[in-house]
Image: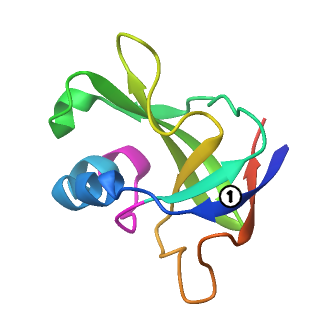
Amino acid sequence: MRRFRGTIQSGVKHFTTRMSKYPEAFEKATGEKLFPGTLNVKVAEQVHIREHFRIIGAEIGEPDQDLLFEVCRINGNWAYRIRPYNLKTGGGGHGDNVLEIACSKQIRSIELQDGDSVEIEFFG
């Protein structure tokens, strides 16, 4: 198991828009309804994604990039790291030191805000 501790930081809400506009694509990929949006977690090192599955970008109006998913946990809750993947450059998102985490329940709350520390666990 790989564990990383990071801090929450604000994002620009791209995933909130994607997940609200195409909820069926995210449910088809994960098998569950996800809370719209991701929690951005900044970690001290680059964490390369181990792809478990993906959404083909053309299915959500983004033909130049796919969305790669890795199953994980955040503070003990089952979740997914989602990394945009530019098909030409391999880049995407905020970089591999900012993990974009989605979950079926709302992770950010009154108790969990920017600057707070969280633990992300990956399997394998």
Question: Image check: 88 left or right of 115?
Answer: left
Q: Position of residue 19 (x, y in %)?
A: 28, 56
**In this view, 104 is above or below 19:** below
The span shown in magenta is: 27-37
> Magenta region's main secondary structure?
loop
Residue at 26% across / 30% down in the picture? 57
Figure quadrant of the C terminus: top right
Residue 91's place in the image compared with 37, above or below, is above
Residue under the image location 68 percent in, 58 percent down: 73
Please report the residue visible at 34 percent of the width from the left and 53 percent of the height from the top: 15
Specify the quadrant of the image occupied by residue 36.
bottom left
Helix, strand or loop at mark 1: strand
- Which corner quadrant of the image does residue 35 belong to? bottom left
Q: Residues within 10 Å of mark 1 (few under 14, many from 20)?
A: many
- Residue 111, compared with residue 7, is above or below; it is below
Q: In the figure, is residue 1 to the left or right of 61?
A: right
Q: What colour scheme does the image use?
A: rainbow
Q: Position of residue 6 (x, y in %)?
A: 74, 56
**Magenta stretch holds residue 36:** yes
- Image quadrant occupied by the N terminus: top right
- Is residue 116 rendered magenta in the image? no
Give residue 58's position: percent from left, percent from top: 18, 28
Q: Relative to residue 9, is residue 104 drawn left or right?
A: left
Residue in view at x 31 percent, y 60 percent: 16
Q: Is residue 56 left or right of residue 99?
A: left
Residue receiving disc 1:
73
Residue that protrudes farthest toward the top in the picture: 88
Q: Position of residue 49 (x, y in %)?
A: 62, 31
Outermost bottom residue: 110
- Callout 1 amino acid: Arg
